[in-house]
Image (tube, helix red, strand yellow):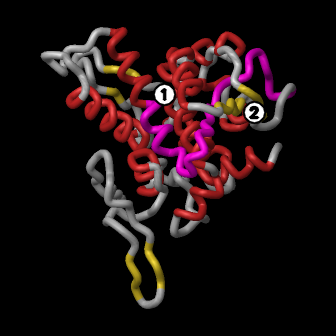
Amino acid sequence: MSELTKELMELVWGPKTSPGLSDTIFCRWTQGFVFSESEGSALEQFEGGPCAVIAPVQAFLLKKLLFTSEKSSWRECQEEERKDLLCHTLCDILETACSDNSGSYCLAAWIRGKTTEDTASISEGPAESSCQEEHTSALAVEELGFERFHSLIHKRSFKSFPELKEAIWDQCSMWANKFGVLLFLYSVILTKGIENIKNEIEDSTEPLIDPVYGHGSQSLINLLLTGHAVSNVWDGDRECSGMTFHYLVEDKSVPIVESFTGSE
């Protein structure tokens, strides 16, 4: 397994000390971006956990629909309009995550026809047509456990934003299938850079997804909303007893609501 694969898995999931627990949490995160049949512009969530990705995507989607759309009724969206809105939204979030202004973007996609025996880590390569990638809708969750899922991921790199937009539209069906949410989360992380994220999180040993309850951390939510994986929600940095606590920049494109998680 490559170092990139190990770093990505540990950043998101933490050390895999309990395979059964990891698979349980992993299965709860295996869903795509699916629109509600009763509310045209609403994304649905099926299990606890992936709201940490779905909610920020929903926020960007509604922002675009309310402030840039010329529709008379924002609650009425046809299928093609939904696809267009979703792809625009994913592009906006990835553009925000590109923190170094290098114009370099990444997508996590699938390697067509590969099995666990064929490939054991995330591979890297140039942008390719989506027809060369695995359509995961044909694969059941049981067939793609935690380990095999990561063995099938392919990192696609793009040198310009127009290239990225074309690829996102080209892979529109992938975002809606069984693993669309996780593939998009990995795309944001790879675009931002694993080391950049570690430098922004207060405690880099804490994974972005809680290994016990499966919810996303505040750092994960902030990363998707603002492009900064800081652990706090106030504006600017603050010093306390000689320590500097990193907070959000002031020019947030969408409002931030801090996540509180309790257990009984």
Q: In this view of the protein, can residue 119 be seen by the observer?
A: yes
- Where does residue 99 sit, x and y in percent of width and height? 53, 50
Residue situated in front as seen by the camera: 22 or 51: 51
Q: Residue at x 48, y 39 (%)?
A: 95
Q: Residues within 10 Å of mark 2 (few under 14, many from 20)?
A: many
Query: In the rendered structure, which disc, 2 or 1, sits on the residue that comes first in sequence?
Result: 1
Residue 64 picture quarter: top left
Q: Amino acid at mark 1?
A: Gln
Q: Which residues are magenta?
A: 90-117
Image quarter of the N terminus: top right
Reading the image, the residue beneath label 2 is 151
Q: In the shown orientation, is residue 40 left or right of residue 127?
A: left
Q: In this view of the protein, can residue 264 be seen by the observer?
A: no
Residue situated in front as seen by the camera: 24 or 261: 261
- Where does residue 126 sit, x and y in percent of width and height? 74, 27
Element on which disc 1 rests: loop
Residue 85 picture quarter: top left
